[in-house]
Amino acid sequence: PCHFTSRMPLGKGASRHTVGGSRRGTITHLLALSLGISLGSFISNLGGPLGLSGYFGSPREAGEGSGTGGTPNPARSGAERGGHFDARQDDAPGTYAEWISRVMPPSLAPVYVAPGALPFNLTMSILRRTRPVVGSTDRVRGFLTKLKKGQCTTSLMLGGSVTAGHNGGGPSNAYPKLFVDYLNARFPCTGADGGSGEHVYKTTNAGNSMSHATSFSSVSNLDRIDLILVEFNVNDHFMPGKDVPHALEDKGPWSDTLEYRSLWYSEMLLRKLLLLRKPDYPAIVVFNADYIGRIWAGNPWSDPKIARRDLFRYNQEPLKLWLSFLYDIPVFSASLFHLALASKLGTDVQFNFNETRDGHNPYGTNIWHADACCHPKADGHRVLALVLVYNFADELWRMDHDGSVGHEDRMEGDFTIDPRRPRLRDPVYMSPDEDGLYVRDSSDGVTIDLTDPNGEDAWRSKVVANEGWTWFADNKDKDKYGLIADDRAGGQHVAFRVTGQEHGVVEATFIVSYENFGIVLVWLDDKEENTRKDMCLTPLKEVSWSSGQLSGIWGERASVPQAELLGDRLRMGESRVLHMCLTPHEGKRNGEGNKFKLLGIRMY
């Protein structure tokens, strides 16, 4: 069978076959169409794809030399070259090098074609696999229209350590900067003063869907957002806790699974993003940039028997695809093609434990990753940037040539961007009450944010007692701030003045990790001094998520944010004191340290 999808529009004067038309004409048309499709597939197998993907221009139209491998003409500006592509397939590129010569500005092309620039041979066939969910194109095309008009844009990269370029050379070598470098070279823009401007990107301190959904002010406080990339395929696996802490109803037996918890918080975040206007609606793309490698590595990293019990082998992508389908949000993915190619010859070859014995696998996970977890090397970030470039360039080609602009069917359009009445589909996992509280309610409540490097003045007055807690950034890059207690003996106490808001909820966000972390007691009362000193000096024998405790101890080899709701509620306007104290180290824990890192407190 021939798997082919055609959505070519009818041009002016084109005929349309109907049920009541000539049967002979209809049969002839179908035979011709079938022959054309079959021939197209045959040629595609011989010499590259015949689909629209990958065709980004004619050398003659783009001001490039004729023939294959033409060199871009630097005399033409990025704005002139952006979006003006020729539909003639006889000039279409069939190789990666030819594609690069047409879409990449000359100043950047050497970054992606120099020997050793990429970890493996990147082909157009691979790039065509990187958009598993097309989704609604309205928002993406809105972003592309801004680029074509020469408007400067702000991209928001929601992600974790992969987005930050951890172990890949840092932010200066990571895909967000590479992608925005491409935008600036390809689509020069005009600044607010009428002079030359620039496209920029921003990031947040939150690390997964839960922490972004519950600390949405890190997004909503930004003045302008034109594009949002949601990169949590890795970090949403690291979502500890019991059940769904923010749920307002019993979610049943599945609620205690990581998969359900991830879906619930991912849905909350997507719904909040879809309603966001900064100042108009942003394009939203789920970007699955990587996967967790160590679950495939075998001993000593992972017990194969335990790994086989995991529903998706630590991979959140099936969950993200499901939600993205339902919410009509485009998905760009590097992990889908890479994991398939890395593992198709077996786990040993996937990790190249012995190249002499197993042979070389250019897609091997340990060639791609800089560590045992999930972080691409510097050359891997160049692949990630190319995945973004490919899919935006492909959408731009279609936008200019598929005839659908201004002619979309009403039901196919994106209802969430309706200027008069934006509409969201009904929630899948969230109840109406949860949606009303966490999504529709525009208020973020009152937040004591301890992660903002410039925010100390805003929260310092809320601290009414402090014995042994210090505010600083404890990571290597010195940019992840929090209020920290660290002492094996325990007893360190801190207290905040908090005031009840509409729903009476008090929420604490903190770091959980696999070693050197401890447990704090937490309670509300009306006194500023520590009234539970004896309890604060008593070791807790068991790690638990029970009421009155916040546990920073977690079994996964990672450090991630966790949000928990206090059992006690506050009436609207009620003022009380929130206490926390670090309990002593207990001998059976991983590591000799006993640290607790508080990221923030929120009342809503």
Image (cartoon, rainbow, N blue to C red):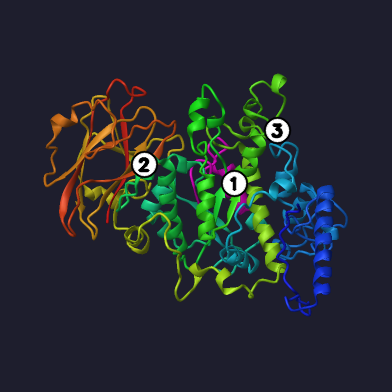
**Residue 533, quarter of picture:** top left
Q: Which residue is mark 1?
A: 175
The region drawn magenta spans: 156-181
| Residue type (three-letter) at the residue carrying disc 3 | Pro
Q: Pointer 2 and pointer 3: residues touching (CB < 8 Å)?
A: no
Q: Secondary structure at mark 3?
A: loop
- Which one is earlier in the sequence, the residue at label 2 or at label 3? 2
Q: Position of residue 577 (x, y in %)?
A: 17, 47
Q: Which residue is mark 2?
A: 256
The answer to whether residue 228 is seen in the rendering is no
Q: Nearer the viewer, residue 248 or 450?
A: 248
Q: Number of callouts in the render?
A: 3
| Residue type (three-letter) at the residue carrying disc 2 | Asp
| Residue type (three-letter) at the residue carrying disc 1 | Tyr
Report the residue at 67% width, 20% height from top: 354
Looking at the rendering, in which quadrant would you find the C terminus? Answer: bottom left
Q: Which residue is mark 3?
A: 362
Report the residue at 48% width, 74% height from top: 419
